[in-house]
Amino acid sequence: MKHLSLHIVSLCAALLLGTPVSLAAGEATTLTYQLGDKTFAAHVETAASPAKGTVFIIHDWDGLTDYEKSRAKMLSDLGFDAIAVDLFGVDAKLENRDDYKRETGALYKDRTQFRARIAAAIDAGVNSARNREKIVIIGYCFGGAATLEAARAGLRADGFVSFHGGLKTPDGQDYSQTTAPVLVLHGSADPVSGMEDVAALINQLKDANVPHDAQIFGGARHSFTVQGSRDYDAQADQKSWDALQRFLAKL
């Protein structure tokens, strides 16, 4: 596994890691760590056999929930160790949309803190990973935006995958520091980031010479992978999961 780039590590100078846990095959566990005075807890699912790699999952705007944990289990069934990270902290109040907006809004406004939390989560997971040779970061909705933030920040990974994420690049940012291929999985009818945002992102990746690919699901709206949501699209959900598996197999 490649190490985090120096400018990202510097953001985590206040990181206080607990004793790294030893991840046993076929088990689920909680990985706790600290950044400054905040405690975070990631959910870990390990493959039953030697891991093909480690996949980090960044959660949606409502925090780390059973949704991300279920995706982690699906990945462990495919032979990957999976770590569903926590960007809000164990003490975050997450009861309604106002809470979700508060937590995500704070990170969008403070990109340095945003990047520090992502880097801290990845660092904590890598310290405990069984397989550090293939590291992939994926995310859903807010987590998709966070995954692209990680790519722009220059985190050293082997791949980045955004599922129906926010695609706009903040002023002053670009993909010149991106270290690995980027895969974008997006609905053509997404009202959060429309097709003009997809095109702009692809052009930015092309201009930065970042290997990239995109799969667009016709008619799919935002949150098309989330069962029970009004935007759920079973066909797009399955196709995007298949695309992730192909991406992982090529790395």
Image (cartoon, rainbow, N blue to C red):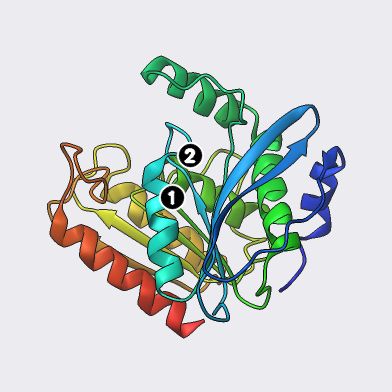
93 relative to 194 in the view: left or right: right
Q: Amino acid at mark 1?
A: Lys
227 relative to 182 in the view: left or right: left
Q: Residue at x 20, y 52 (%)?
A: 188
Q: Amino acid at mark 2?
A: Leu
Q: Residue at x 31, y 37 (%)?
A: 192
* Placement of 59 over or under 246, stated as above or below: above
Mark 2 surroundings within 10 Å by alpha-carbon count, few (fewer than 14), some (14 through 19), many (20 or more): many
Q: Residue at x 15, y 52 (%)?
A: 233
Q: Quadrant of residue 183?
A: bottom left
Quarter of the figure that contains the N terminus: bottom right
Residue 89 visible within the image: yes
Mark 1 surroundings within 10 Å by alpha-carbon count, few (fewer than 14), some (14 through 19), many (20 or more): many
The answer to which of 134 and 22 lies nearer the viewer is 22
CB under 8 Å between discs 1 and 2: yes
Q: Which residue is mark 2?
A: 64
* Placement of 186 over or under 251, stated as above or below: above
Q: Secondary structure at mark 1?
A: helix
**Real-space Cα separation, disc 1 to disc 2, in angstroms:** 8 Å
Q: Secondary structure at mark 2?
A: loop
Horizontal and vertical percent for residue 173? 61, 46
Q: Which residue is mark 1?
A: 69
The answer to which of 151 and 40 lies nearer the viewer is 40
**Mark 1 or mark 2, earlier in chain:** 2
The answer to which of 81 and 135 lies nearer the viewer is 81
Q: How many marks?
A: 2
